[in-house]
Amino acid sequence: MNSDPLFPLFLSLRVAGMATLLALLIGIFLAWVIARSDLPGRDVLSALTALPLVLPPTVLGYYLLVALGQQSPLGRWLARHGMSLVFTWRGAVIAATVVALPLVVQSAQAALSAIDQDLEEVARTLGRSEPAVFFTVTLPLAWRGILAGAILAFARALGEFGATLMVAGNIPGRTQTMPIAIYDAVQGGNQSEANLLAGIVTVVAVGLLVVARRSTRYIPW
C-alpha cells in the first residue's frame, strides 16, 4: 500500500483536470474543422479522433509509448531539451488526454452543427471578424455541448487505466493513479483498500454523469 493513501486520488484529479483542459483546447478546434470547414478528408479526421474509443487501451498505450519514447524523433527531441514524458505523471496526462478527446469532439461537434448559422452571418454583416464571431456568438451558443464534453472527458480521464499504465507505469508516490492503485490493491489481496478506492471512483463518476445529463442534451449516448 502506498505510504500516502490519498496520493492516487489527488494525482488522478490533477491528471484528469489537466487532460480535460488539453482535450477542450484540441477538441473544440477539431470539432469546428469537422462540423464547419470544407477541408478534404474530414471523414478521415473524424474517424481518427474517434479511434481511441474502439482501440484496446493497451494498444493505444503502446502507440503512445513508441511515439514518446527516446527511440522516436519526438522522444529524442524531448530528451535533448531535458524533458521526459514516459514513466512520469505528465505521460499520464497525455494518455488521459488522448482517451478523453473523442468525447469532447463528439459533443462539441453536435453542438456546433445544431447552431443556426444565420446568427453568425448577422454578426459578420455587423462587421465582426471571424475570431470575434467564434468567441462571441458560436461558443456561447454551443456552451452546453462543450460542457457535456468537458464533464465526460473528465470522468473518462479519471478512470483511465490501460494506456496510463503503459505510458506512465505504476510507481507509487509518482505515477500511481486511482485505477492503478485499485489494480495494485487487488493484486496484493488488499480487498478493503480496493473497495474503498473503487467506491470513491464510482461515486465521482456517477455524480459527473448526473450533472452532465441534467446540464445538456448533447451527450453522445
Image: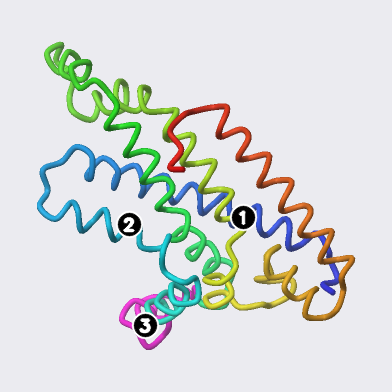
| Element under disc 3 | helix
User: What whole-number distance in Å separates the C-alpha atoms at marks 1 and 3?
Assistant: 29 Å
Q: In x, y percent, where is residue 124?
A: 15, 18
- Write the residue at 51% across / 77% down: 86
Query: Mark 2 or mark 1, which has the lower sequence index?
Result: 2
User: What whole-number distance in Å separates the C-alpha atoms at marks 3 and 2?
Assistant: 26 Å
| Element under disc 1 | helix
Residue on which disc 1 sits? 158
Residue on which disc 2 sits? 49
Cβ–Cβ under 8 Å for marks 1 and 3: no
Nearer to us of marks 3 and 2 is 2
Q: What's the amino acid at mark 2?
A: Thr
User: What whole-number distance in Å separates the C-alpha atoms at marks 2 and 1?
Assistant: 19 Å
Cβ–Cβ under 8 Å for marks 3 and 2: no
- Write the residue at 46% across / 76% down: 82
Q: In x, y percent, where is residue 112?
A: 30, 32
The question of residue 45 being in magenta is answered with: no
Q: Residues within 10 Å of mark 2 (few under 14, many from 20)?
A: many
- Write the residue at 45% across / 79% down: 62
Query: Mark 3 or mark 2, which has the lower sequence index?
Result: 2
Q: What's the amino acid at mark 3?
A: Arg
Q: In x, y percent, where is residue 99?
A: 46, 60
Q: What's the amino acid at mark 1?
A: Leu
Residue on which disc 3 sits? 76
